[in-house]
Image (cartoon, rainbow, N blue to C red):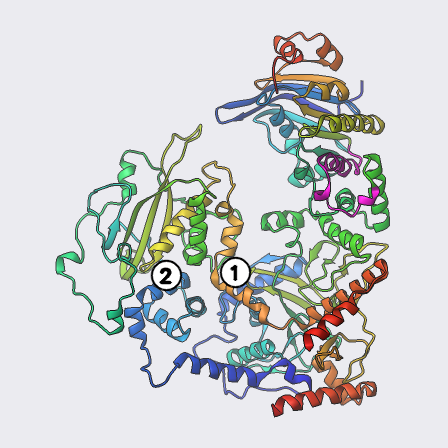
Amino acid sequence: MTTALMRVRNLDKRFDTIHACRNVSFELHQGEVLGVVGESGSGKTTLLRCLSGEMLPSAGTVEYDVRMRGLTDIAALSEPERRLLRRTDWGIVHQNPRDGLRMNISAGGNVGERLMAVGARHYGEIRGEAVDWLERVELDQDRIDDAPSTFSGGMQQRLQIARNLVSKPRLVFMDEPTGGLDVSVQARLLDLLRGLVRDLHIAAIVVTHDLAVVRLLADRLMVMRRGEVVESGLTDQVLDDPQHAYTQLLVSSVLQP
Amino acid sequence: MYVAVKGGEKAIANAHKLLDEQRRGDPNIDEVEVDQIREQLSLAVARVMAEGSLYDPDLAALAVKQSQGDLVEAIFLVRAYRTTLARFATSQPIDTARIDIKRRISAAYKDLPGGQLLGPTFDYTHRLLDMALAEGRPAHEVEADAAGVDGEMPRVTDILNYEGLIETDEEDPERDPSRDLTRQPLAFPAARDERLQNLARGDEGFLLALGYSTQRGFGGNHPFAGEIRRGTVTVSIVPEELGFAIEIGEIEVTECQMINQFQGSAEMAPVFTRGYGLTFGHNERKAMAMALVDRALRWRELGELPQYPAQDEEFVLYHSDNVEASGFVQHLKLPHYVDFQSELQLIRQLRAEHAGRFGHNDDAQNDNIQAEAAE
Amino acid sequence: MTVATNHNGGTESGYNFAYLDEQTKRMIRRCLLKAVAIPGYQVPFGSREMPLAYGWGTGGIQVTASIIGPDDVLKVIDQGADDTTNAVSIRHFFQRTADVATTEETEDATIIQTRHRVPETAMKEGQILVYQVPQPEPLRQLEPRETECRKIHGYAEYGLMHVKLYEDIARFGHIATSYSYPVLVNGRYVMSPTPIPKFDNPKMDSFPALQLFGAGREKRIYAVPPYTTVKSLDFDDHPFSVQKWDQACALCGAEDSFLDEVILDDRGRKMFVCSDSNYCEQRQAAGYSNPAAAADIAAYQLALQGEADA
């Protein structure tokens, strides 16, 4: 087996009296999509923040296979190294595209920013890449000079995905990527995401309360409840034959999100 | 040649003369004296001293006279003078518990040791223009016992402190107590002493608006005016060659202690928290606004969420100084010919390109409008 | 050499030479040394409150006051001209407080304090050009927070700067920044050249004189040592370019200088003259003129006459 892209050991996160994540451990490999499900308050978003370096865990480690360095504790990286990782080798897709886009910059500028950040200085090439990426996320390339504020929610989300994937990240974090979208729009977006992740062989960690999302996207699944992972395994296995009572509840849709 | 367009030395000299003529106004009317300003426009003088950061009623009164009553300009004059003064010592912290009191009120307690003392205040006046004043009526005389009180005047925050209901203000022994914002640039995040220094010099109107915003809904600190006191305190220094404190004078100050709610956290039980305001002279509005803004800016140490404008340290501290703000806003009066020329060229180019791209030229239309306007 | 001396007979009483006290000057010179050692880096300094308003040159004045000596010869320009009101005012300030000789000749000055222009006449080694800086932070319009700007500079994360240029090209087909055009100094720090027109940017590159920048209100000092690379940000396929005029200066016929537009009437008639008044006068004294503009000059003189009569 190859070495892991990300390795998490005994991750704990506390806020004052709240124990948001307890003893979470897992490994993620290149090209693998991990789904994290649970109702709101289960600690899944806190976990994602700890993994993406936005927060430091109270205990435990998050290691990432930094290029040229191998598995490295991300807490041990300097701030500029962490910032560099976040805008090159990682992608972060927020639930609300406004958190992940520059709303007053054109679509092309949004997609091109990561390229310029790593030194691209040829306008024509940057624009060419932007056109290419708009096409890949099924946005009309005539909209390249329009600001995202003129886009629909689904279009903004696709633009956010293009903005992240343009730097060819190896790992993408997604927080409820289809939340807030109409059901029909959700389905198209999921289809698009699945295609991109497979084609580009990108690893992803997808946090959601929506089991339909993980069924379509995730290879493996972790079910969280009150900060703990109560069950994990291959997605089909967990969803078709849930072992833990909480997972059974989730699957039988007794729990509303 | 085209010198005339660019002003010059003569224009400046003339402007100075005209300004002085305007200052004097009608020469048939008596000229106002500096000591009249000091005594009869004492609140203007107090504001100039507070925001000018220099306690000198005579110089502040002179500045008010010289600036023709433009207080921000007067503050600027005092600041520019202050910056040239040598620092010969750093005073000991003043003790506002040992105050020769003129006014002291608490909105938190009905009665308290030392009592409530209304003192001189506009608060309960009816804002009716006093026509008799225009006629030059004599001032009211005050009976001796109404003028002030002696005795113990413990601070309300100290009273709360006996019960441990309010946070204590701990001194940080690591910090240089004489750090001076006019000598060292502000750095972020700013410590509380730097923030308070900045607010003490800050524009009264700006702080008033920010403090107001925290009460109206852009903030959530639920303040009580724990205590407002005004009076005279002594200032002392410890000269190196003596090694003990000597008094060098007295200053009048207004102090406001706001008491605010705090829900508590895992480490800290629920407790009242403080917002602090202190100004030179009689300056109650400023002291209260300052205390509200001070409390709002303390979100970080109290683990609150920064959600409101008054909590935004960079926004508040970078824009509070009226000498900086006034200078920069008014510098727009300076010639910008060169930049404007660059923009003129650019806009002509952009319009020509626009016409080229979209195949119409609305210059002709504009010319028509101008022609009509000229007629 | 035409050098004017102060006829007031000595400096303003009660103030130190060049207004600032010696401790303050030393503090500022330490910051200047640091700035020279790290070209383009903004050094925070204990900016003093000056008797001139913030935004009117307090930073440049403090820098000049800290480096000027009794033997220096000072030139002050605003918009390229020695006779604009603020230049006159600042020159007076140093005449009053430092009793130094002043000049309008670029060649004769040891220190030139400027707002918005780099002189047309080439400066040489040993001279110092002091810029007045209203806003030292080239990122400010993109990122209002000082704390974040410091990180962007510290980690050299300058992608955002190019996003702005990208947006210009996408919208207009070319970069539409005409002044305060950002530069990269010594391959490391992105720096605001102050609101000089981009026309002047190329002069800053490998400049033989020392360039010092003072921002009083924002409390920052920065510097470009002699012969340092100063590159205007651009794209490979949209290289930086400067303004050009179809006209020559109406007075001296110069075709290589930055021209100001002088309005002759309310029907759009105008003429163009050098913004650098000293450069223009020198050329006129050397016999250069622009016969093609004779009618414009006559119209201008007529207009002036009209004003005088009215």
- Find numbered disc 2 in the image and state the secondary structure of the residue it sits on: loop
Kindly identify the amino acid type of the residue bearing the numbered disc 2.
Ala
Q: Is residue A160 covered in magenta?
A: yes
Q: Picture coordinates of residue B204 (x, y %)?
A: 41, 58
Q: Picture coordinates of residue C84 (x, y %)?
A: 62, 79
Q: Picture coordinates of residue B303 (x, y %)?
A: 48, 36
Residue C301 visible at all: yes
Seen in the picture, residue B119 relative to A169 is either above or below; the reply is: below
What residue range appears in magenta?
Answer: A141-169
Q: Quadrant of the C terminus of chain C?
A: bottom right
Q: Residue at x 49, y 53 (%)?
A: B317
- The answer to which of C68 and A103 lies nearer the viewer is A103
What residue did someone put label 1 on? C46
Residue C1 visible at all: no
Which chain hosts label 2?
B
Q: Is residue A100 left or right of residue C13?
A: right
Which chain hosts label 1?
C
Predominant SS of the magenta segment: helix
Q: Quadrant of residue B346?
A: bottom right
What label sits on residue C84 in the rendered view?
none
Residues behind callouts 1 and 2 on a single chain: no
Seen in the picture, residue A53 relative to C42 is either above or below; the reply is: above
Q: Tell me if mark 2 has few (under 14), some (14-19) or many (20+) residues whose alpha carbon lies within 10 angstroms of its own.
A: few
What residue did someone put label 2 on? B89
Real-space Cα distance between discs 1 and 2? 19 Å
Seen in the picture, residue C173 relative to A185 is either above or below; the reply is: below
